[in-house]
Amino acid sequence: MNHKSFKINRCGIGGLSEMNWHVVFPKAWMWGILLFGALFSCREDVDKSQLENYEGPYRISHEIELLHSDSALVRTKLMAAKQLEYLNRDTEFPEGIVIHFFDRDGTLSTTIRADRGYYDRKNNLYRGEGDVQVENLKKEQKLSSEELFWDPGKKKIYTEKFVTVEEPDQIIKGTGMEADEGFNEYTFTNVSGEIENAL
């Protein structure tokens, strides 16, 4: 096999700028090496501050599913089509988020859906935005709002925005609401109206 000696001289990469390297490559590889070298040539016009000040996500994941277990039983399942992770460990779900809550017997009890989702790592707090829907399947109870927070540590959901709660026999509207994460019991801050549910 034919080989050629390929010399790398004064390439400005870290501490190798003053060294001469001689590497033997097969002839067939020469064009690939030259192309690689052209792409990563010794340029000094790169603004390194742009890299240092980068605030975008460092990891992008698709079709994610996160499970939380208690005593070997799955209690919550978070699903999202796309997840963006940042260096401060905050997370964004730009294409929507779905959270399932399970009873101790494994039965799905409550669901939360939102058009967009965010996770604040420092405060261990999730936030849903857009069309936010909560449903307690056992009580046939639904909630809708434009924003909702979920605190896994306190096992609470809450919002300061306008809320509509639909029960089998009535519909309640108001501003500000707090409930347990399973949406079994809830409290309004201000109730603006109650009507009987005709359905």
Image (spheres, helix red, strand yellow):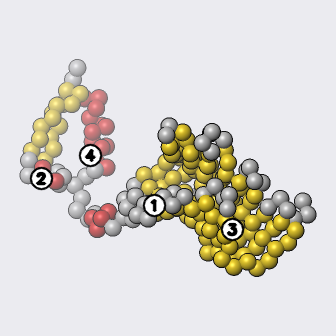
**In what element is the residue under mark 1?**
loop
Q: Earlier in the sequence, mark 1 or mark 3?
A: 1
Residue at (63, 64) in percent of width and height: 179
Mark 3 belongs to which amino acid?
Ser
Report which residue position mark 4 lands on.
Answer: 37
Q: CA distance from mark 2 to mark 1?
A: 42 Å
Label 1, label 3: how far apart the Cα atoms are: 21 Å
**Residue 116 seen in the figure:** no
Query: Which residue type carries mark 4?
Result: Gly
Q: Are marks 1 and 3 in contact (CB under 8 Å)?
A: no
Between 35 and 85, the residue placed more toward the observer is: 85
94 horizontally vs 187: left or right: left
**46 sits left or right of 94 in the view:** left
Secondary element at image label 4:
helix
CA distance for labels 4 and 3 = 55 Å
Q: Amino acid at mark 2?
A: Gly
Q: Earlier in the sequence, mark 3 or mark 2?
A: 2
Residue occupied by mark 2: 15
